[in-house]
Amino acid sequence: MNTPINTSISYFSLNKFSAVVRFLTLVDFLINSGFGLITPIFAVFIMDNIEGANVEIAGIAVTVFLLTKSLLQIIVGSAIDKIRGERDDFAFLLLGGIAYSAIPLMYIFIDTPLELYLVQFAYGVAASFAYPSWMAIFTRHIDHEHEGVEWSVYATLVEFGMAVAASLGGFVAYRFGFAFLFITASAIIFVSNVFIWMIYNKLKLKQEKAKHGHK
């Protein structure tokens, strides 16, 4: 009865995960930490900086993002499933990552609800590119004898980053202002693209296999 538990515990080391899984975990850690700086105080930013803003506008802004992401990610997911190999998955992930890093900077320049909604739409488009492609690559490279451990380690690290960021976001905004907060968030998210690039060579084998009819 003790053997499976001990095996899982010994497998906890990140060094035993595939390089792709490790890099993708770092990608999501950085992206969620960056946005984690903003999310807890986003409504405060809207109320303080958007002309005529109220709680209704804040709610609509979140809805615009979620609806855009929810609808478009189905289209993107279907597209990457139809194309053989991982070149398309990588391209969508990189495009999404680059777009993600631009979103916080856009918040600096908005003044009206319409501009806010447009940025939220762009945010949803970025998420619809990044999320399905990230999930496809991660799922394909996970160790299928340790799915529970690898998903748990991923979730723990990402949620830890979000927890720390949530406590820092308010402090940074209060001490240095929202513009500095958004620039910091953008910089953190931008670094995630470095790790996206680092998985490219790891995907070439998958692309070669795809030429012979395998996904």
Image (tube, rainbow, N blue to C red):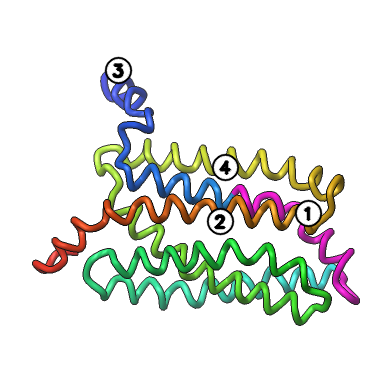
Range drawn in magenta: 33-54
Disc number lying in front (4 or 3): 4
Residue 189 falls left or right of residue 23: right
Q: State the separation of the CA atoms marked 1 and 2.
A: 21 Å
Query: Label 4 sits on what residue type?
Result: Glu
Residue tagged 1: 41
Helix, strand or loop at mark 3: helix
Query: Label 3 sits on what residue type?
Result: Asn
Taking depth in this image into account, of 108 and 168 the one nearest to the observer is 108
Residue tagged 4: 159
Taking depth in this image into account, of 15 and 214 the one nearest to the observer is 15
Q: Residue at x 58, y 51 (%)?
A: 32
Helix, strand or loop at mark 1: helix
Q: Which mark is residue 190?
A: 2
Looking at marks 1 and 2 on the same chain, the residue that comes earlier in the sequence is marked by 1
Looking at marks 4 and 3 on the same chain, the residue that comes earlier in the sequence is marked by 3
Q: Position of residue 84 (x, y in %)?
A: 22, 70
Q: Residues within 10 Å of mark 3 (few under 14, many from 20)?
A: few
